[in-house]
Image (cartoon, helix red, strand yellow):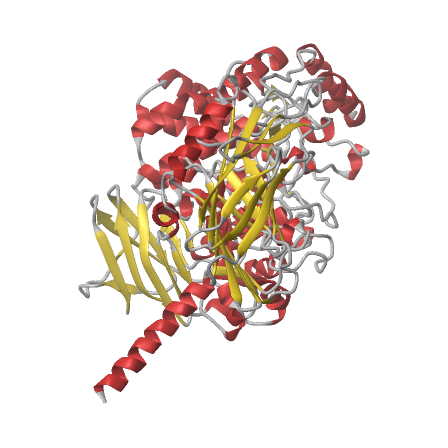
Amino acid sequence: MKKVYILIFLLGVSLVHSQETQNLKLWYNQPSGDIWENALPIGNGRLGAMIYGNVDKEIIQLNEHSLWSGSPNRNDNPAALKAIPEIRKLIFEGKHKDAEKLANQNIITKKSHGQMFQPLGNLNLVFDGHENYTNYHRELDIEKAVAKTIYTLGDVTYTRETFASMTDRVIVMRVSTSKAGSLSFKVDYTSPQKQKTFATTPNKDLTIFGVTSDHETVKGMVKFKGITRIKLDGGSLSSTDTELSIKNATTATIYISIATNFNNYKDISGDENKRATEYLNKAFSKSYDKLLTSHIAAYQKYFNRVKLDLGTTPAVDLPTDERLKNFRNTNDPSLVSLYFQYGRYLLISSSQPGGQPANLQGIWNKNINPAWDSKYTININAQMNYWPAERTNLAELHQPFLEMIKELSVTGQETAKVMYGAKGWVAHHNTDIWRVTGAVDGSFWGTWPEAGGWLSQHLWEHYLYNGDKTYLASVYPAIKGAAQFYVDFLVEDPQNKWLVVSPSISPENSPKSFEGASIDAGTTMDNQIVFDIFSTTIRAAEALNTDTAFIETLKKTRNRLAPMHIGQYNQLQEWLDDIDDPKDNHRHISHLYGLFPSNQISAYKTPELFAAAKNTLIQRGDVSTGWSMGWKVNWWAKLQDGNHAYKLIQNQLTPLGVNPGGGGTYNNLFDAHPPFQIDGNFGCTSGISEMLVQSSNGAIHLLPALPDVWKDGNVNGLKTRGGFEVLEMQWKDAKLIKLVIKSELGGNLRLRLPNTMKQKSGADLLDANGENPNPFYFVAETPAAIISKKATIMLLELKPTTIVDIPTKKGNVITLLSK
C-alpha cells in the first residue's frame, strides 16, 4: 500500500507543478501566419524578436534597442521666446484659437518632430515540404523566457526553442528533430531598411549591414550589423551570396548577433562590426545548454521575485487566444495572473540596465515608419511603462528610464533657455533616442511644458522605495532643475492672482468653448504637476540637507499655485474655468493625475476631491483606448472600487474589435490602442498590484480594491515605499488571514488592514495615531478645493479598515495572522 500512496502523492505533485507551469505560458495550436500581433515576443533589453511559429516559412522579426533613424540633433524653436508674452496675452483675453495659431508658428519645432525606432528586418527559415504537419503547438514560457514551436511531419517531431539571452547579447534558436539526419532548411535575411547589404562570409556567416533612415531634416547615421552563425549536429552547411542551406542535420543551433555604432545620444562613433562579431564569438563558443541555463537563471533573478495566485479554473486548459475570447463571459482568474506576470515579463525583456528604456512598443517593432514613430510619448505613455517597476519588485529595470530622465535634464536646459528664457530644464510631450526636448506635432498636442515635472517624480519614487541617499544626491540636480524651470516660467493669472503655467494644455483635450483649440493657462494637471515637483524638491533638499534658500522660494511659490476646483457637475474641473462637458468621453483624463500616479487626491485627506474624481471617471465612461484602460484600472483601484477596476480588466482582456470605441488585447496579449502600444500592458499590471497593495497615502493599504471574483488568493514579493516587501499575503473570503512583511530600511510600519489581525506571538497590535513618523510616507498637504456653488458633492462611503503601527529595524520580518 505504501508504494501506491507514494505514487498517488508524486502524481499529485506532478499535476500541481504542471498546472502552475501551464498558468505561466501563452500557448496556441495555430501558427501566426503573416500577422505580427500573433507572434510571440522575446527580448533581453538590447535585442528584441518576434517569433511567428510558422512551420514551412518561419519568421524571426528582429529589433535592436539603439537602431533608430536620424543622428544627434536638437529641435528647439528660438522664436518662442519673443512670442510667449503675446501668446499669454491672447490666452488671458480668451482668444485661444489665435493663441494656438501663434504657438504653432513660434513654439512648435521647424526641425525634427522626433526620430523613429526602426527594425533590422527578418531572419527567415524555409523548410521545404513541411506544409502537411500535425500535432502543432507553440508557446511562450514566461517563467523561463523561452519560446517554443513543436510539430510532427510523418514520423518525425520537430522542435524549435528560442530565447534572447540575458547573459550573452545574442538571440539563440535551436532546431532539433526526433530522427537523426532529418533536418534540412534554408536561411536568409530580408529588411525594410532602404540602405542595406546582405552577404555571406567565407566561414558561412550570414550578414546584414546598413544605415538607418533620414527623417525630417535629420540624416540617418546609425550603422547596424547583424550576423547569423549556425552550429550543426550532423549534416552539412553551404552558402550562396545571400543564403545559408542546411542539409540532413539532426540539430541546428542558430546564433544571431546585432550591434550598432550608437554609444549615447550625442555619440555614434562605435564600431558596429567589431561589437556584433565579439558578441557572436563569445556566445558561439558556448553550448546551447550552457547559454540556456545561464539565461534562465539571470531572467528568473527578476521574474521569480513576485508570485500571484488568484485561483485556477478549467479555462486554463484552453489556448490563450480562446481564453481571451471567453474571458468576459467566464471565470478565468488565472488569465489575470498570467496577464499581470506577462507585463513583468515584457518589462524584464525590454528594459535592462545600461540599455534604452522601453519605448511606445517596448523593443518590438516591424515597421520602418511605425505609428507615432514608436518613440517616447512623455505626457503619459512612457511614464506608464514604468509604473510596475518599483511596486512589482523590478526596481533595477527602472534604471534605463531614470537615466533617460537625467539625460533630458541636460538637453532640456538649452530648450528652457532659448525658448523660454528660464533656468533649469524643460521637455514637452515627446522625445526620442536623441533626447530632443522641443515641442512637436502641433500646438494642440505639443504646447505642454510639463514633462520635466512629471518625469522627475520617477527619480523621486525610486528613492522612496530604496532610501538610498547616495542615489538621491546623484539625481537631485535633475529634480531641482525641473523645479527651477517652473519658478521662472510661472506667470500671474490676472483674474485670480494665482501663479499658473502659460501657455500649456490639458493633454490631449480641449473644451468646446475654445473652438477646437487646446491652449490655455493653469490647467488642473499643470497645477498638480508643479505642486508635486515643488514638494518633491523640498523633500529631497531636506533629506540631503541642502539648498535652504531655494526651499523657502519653493514654499512661497507653491503657496501661490491655483488649487483644484470642483465644478457644477460635481466633477474635478479639468480647467480653471468650470467648462467641462459631462458627456465628454475623451481618452485622456489628465486632471486625475492628482489621484494617480500622484497622491494629492486622497480618500482620507481630501474626501471632497476624492468624490469629485469618481464623478469625473463616471462621466468620462469606461470606453477607452488600450493605454487609457490601463490608467483607469489604477484610478478605480485608488477609488477602492475593486469591482469597477475588474470591469476595466475585462475590457482590457477582450479581443480587438469587441469593445466599442477601441482598446482591447491582441492574441499575443499585446495591448491594442489600437494599434499596438505596450503601455496598456504595463498600466494594467500596475493596476492589478494597486488593487492588492497601495503605499502612497501615508500607510501600506492592503487589499484596498479586492473585487468579488478574487475572494481567495495570495501574492508574494510586492514592494512598497520605505523599503518594505510583502513576502507573503494570503486572503480567504476577502479576509486577510496571513501577512509577512520584511523591513529593508527600518522605521515605522503603518498598515491599513481590511480586518483585525494579531502578531504571530498572539499580541495585539497598536492603533496608529497622528501622522506616520516614517519620512517615506510623508504626504504634502493638498490645498483646499474651491467648490462651485452649483455643486452638490456627496462624500463616498469607504470600507472600514484598521490602522496599526509597528516599529521595525532593518532586516525585521513581521508576521501577522487573522484573529
Residue at point 58%, 50% (across, down):
185
The image shows a total of numbered marks equal to 0
Looking at the image, can residue 734 be seen? no
Quarter of the image that includes the N terminus? bottom left
Quadrant of the image occupied by residue 735: bottom left
Most extreme residue toward the bottom is 1
- The quarter holding residue 441 reads top right
Residue 338: percent from the left, percent from the top? 49, 59
Please report the residue visible at 71 percent of the width from the left and 45 percent of the height from the top.
Answer: 586
Residue farthest to the left? Answer: 761
* Residue 560 visible in the picture: yes
Q: Residue at x 33, y 73 (%)?
A: 13
Q: Nearer the viewer, residue 648 or 557?
A: 648
Q: Nearer the viewer, residue 268 or 132?
A: 132
**682 vs 781, nearest the viewer:** 682
Looking at the image, residue 565 lies above or below residue 76: below
In this image, 580 relative to 671: left or right? right
Say if 14 sits above or below 197 in the image. Answer: below
Residue at 47%, 29% (x, y): give it. Answer: 276
Residue 655, percent from left and from top: 66, 59
Does residue 778 appear left or right of residue 688 in this picture?
A: left
Towards the viewer: 636 or 221: 221
Q: In the image, residue 606 lies at what x, y percent?
A: 50, 46
Q: Quadrant of the C terminus?
A: bottom left
Relative to 429, 248 lies left or right: left
Residue 343 image position (x, y, % from top left): 50, 50
